[in-house]
Image (spheres, rainbow, N blue to C red):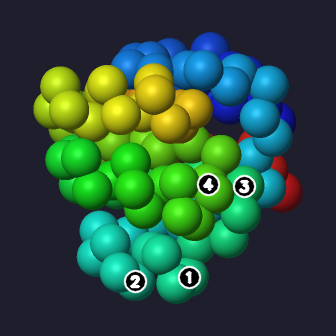
Amino acid sequence: MTVKELADKFSFTVCSMPDPDRKIGGVYIGDLLSWVMGRADCDDAWITIMSNINVAAVATLADVSCVILAENVAPDEELKKAATEKNINLFTSPHSAYETAVKLYGELK
């Protein structure tokens, strides 16, 4: 599944989608940024409630396919700008992290 297919299928709000054809290889849920850096796999969809500029740095280091902000968390302007500049796909989901992950799991298995 590509990040565009994901966003379209679940009606996630697109905050930045510079790489719509990027494939999603798995899912990682986490809010402790240092933990995500060391444990998220390349091409994971990263689900978090963190919404500041540091998310862009971690997404780049971990090389995730996209960042999904759960529970309608809105990214701050710095994060939106950085996501676009750093080629990071960034969405918001109205669902909890758990519910968002379950939706993705159903599509990726």
N-terminal label among 3 and 2: 2
Where is residue 21? Give x, y as percent: 79, 25
The amino acid type found where label 2 is placed reads: Trp
Spatial separation of the CA atoms under disc 3 and disc 4: 4 Å
Left or right: 56, with 78 as reference point: right
Q: Earlier in the sequence, mark 2 or mark 4?
A: 2
> Is 29 on the left-hand or right-hand side of 77?
right
The residue beneath circle 2 is: 35
Which residue is tagged 3? 43
Local SS, label 4: loop
Is label 3 in contact with label 4 (beta carbons under 8 Å)?
Answer: yes
Number of numbered discs: 4
Q: Position of residue 2 (x, y in %)?
A: 78, 31
Residue 22 left/right relative to 67: right
Q: Residues within 10 Å of mark 3 (few under 14, many from 20)?
A: some
Determine contact: label 1, label 2, CB under 8 Å.
yes
Q: Secondary structure at mark 3?
A: loop
